Image (cartoon, helix red, strand yellow):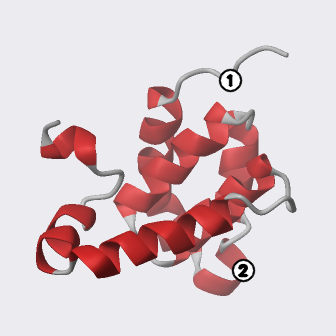
Amino acid sequence: MSPSNAWSFPFEEPLHDAFPALHDAQSSWLSQIDSLQAPDRKTHELIRLVCTVILRNPPGIRRHAQLAREVGAEWEEVLGSIMLTVPAFGMLAAVEAMPHAREGFDAARPPEAD
């Protein structure tokens, strides 16, 4: 498997190369967070999206907008979540996040119909 397909996030390959046990432990820990029963998965991804907007992390914004769509979020929910960051973190972070979120949202597999 090529590195572009082997890792979910760009930081994983250098972390794994330097500290494989640490990377494995972190992956295990993150999988436990992903398995939380509440909030529901869509809300979970929207919260993580907001966190990445606050951090001004474009790859994270793309990733969580994509995952939010894949679990049923509409573009208006993604955009509204981004805008909720404005009162505390300012307009610039939100505006900068929008094209990254759109890119991730558009790259998502459409959610499966029930």
Decide: is 89 above or below 77: below
Seen as rendered, the residue at the extreme bottom is 88
Rendered location of residue 64, percent (x, y): 54, 52
Q: Which residue is painted at 74% across and 53% down in the image?
A: 80
Residue 88's x, y, as percent? 68, 85
At horizontal 70% and vertical 65% (from top left) the residue drawn is 47
- Residue 53 visible at all: no
- Indicate the amino acid at tag 2: Pro
Q: Upstream in the sequence, badge 2 or badge 1?
A: 2
Left or right side of 82 for 14: left
Question: What is the three-letter code of the residue carrying label 1?
Answer: Pro
Count of numbered circles on the image: 2
The residue positioned 36% from the left and 70% from the top of the image is: 24
**Residue 5 visible from this viewpoint:** yes
| Residue 72, horizontal then vertical, whole percent | 75, 33
Q: Quarter of the image for the N terminus: give it.
A: top left
Left/right placement of residue 50 relative to residue 18 reads: right
Please name the residue that numbered disc 2 is placed on. Answer: 87
| Secondary structure type for disc 2 | helix
Splitting the image into 4 quarters, where does residue 57 fall? Answer: bottom left
State the quadrant of the C terminus: top right
Q: Which mark is residue 85?
A: none
Q: Give coordinates of residue 18: x percent, y percent.
A: 12, 79
Q: Mark 2 or 1, which is nearer the eye?
A: 1
Tell me the residue that label 1 is attached to: 111
Of helix, strand and loop, which one carries label 1? loop
